[in-house]
Image (cartoon, coloured by chain):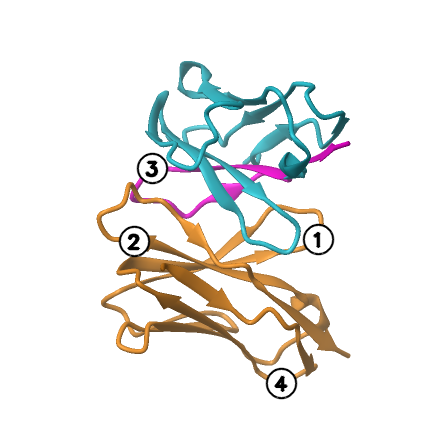
Amino acid sequence: SQKIEQNSEALNIQEGKTATLTCNYTNYSPAYLQWYRQDPGRGPVFLLLIRENEKEKRKERLKVTFDTTLKQSLFHITASQPADSATYLCALVPKDSSYKLIFGSGTRLLVRP
Amino acid sequence: EAGVAQSPRYKIIEKRQSVAFWCNPISGHATLYWYQQILGQGPKLLIQFQNNGVVDDSQLPKDRFSAERLKGVDSTLKIQPAKLEDSAVYLCASSLGLERNEQFFGPGTRLTVL
């Protein structure tokens, strides 16, 4: 069956450290993958998009990698801050789809001061 | 630039009643999406419009859910009759187009069905 898996357990880290979140997928062939941030009571906010032919994308303190062999994307936040505490969702767009975005269930990140 | 607007923000109804949600996307965005997000899960796409045509509604429970996009701008999502399992947050999102689908989400409508 097709799955997108993110750690259901919250990631708890100290301020200043690098947070690394994982997104694994099964039985999908993604054209590209997106990462979103969601705060309680709010809609998701787009962060980064990475295409299948890209290995890495950066934006300020954020970095995303995409390994189509491992069927995995990693999302890194360097020099993490308490304000980075939120749920982070990965989503992929399968090839041969109507550009339909399929979301994982998200990982909650808690950054301790 | 104004964001995606949704109303109401909260709605409580009893099962078998009907309910409607409204969404106004970002001006100029051709593609509009409705998602259902159950607590602890990621958003699940219900329906996707390109202008006023339906691109994907494969996961829309068509026996009780309906949606339309008026003149390719605003959209409404209706549930009739509601079931307990419809309790969720209903999110509307829009994007410039199908390929340019960095999506901008509204704040959502939290529906509770009693």
Question: Which x, y percent locates residue B69?
Answer: 45, 20
- The residue that disc 1 covers is A40
Q: Residue A17 shows which numbered tag?
A: 4
What's the magenta region? B89-114
Badge 2 or badge 4: first in the primary sequence: 4
Q: Colour of chain B?
A: cyan
- The residue that disc 2 covers is A94
Image point (65%, 18%), residue name: B18
Q: Are marks 4 and 3 in contact (CB under 8 Å)?
A: no
Pointer 1 indicates a residue of which chain?
A: A
Residue B18 appears left or right of A113: left
Q: Report the front residue among B82 and B46.
A: B82
Residue B84, magenta (yes or no): no
Look at discs 4 and 1 and give the one toward the viewer.
1
Label 1: how many Cα within 10 Å (few below 14, some 14–19, many 20+):
few
Q: Report the front residue among B92 and B29.
A: B92
Image point (76%, 25%), residue name: B14
Pointer 3 indicates a residue of which chain?
A: B
Q: Report the front residue among B18 and B27.
A: B18
Can you see residue B65?
Answer: yes
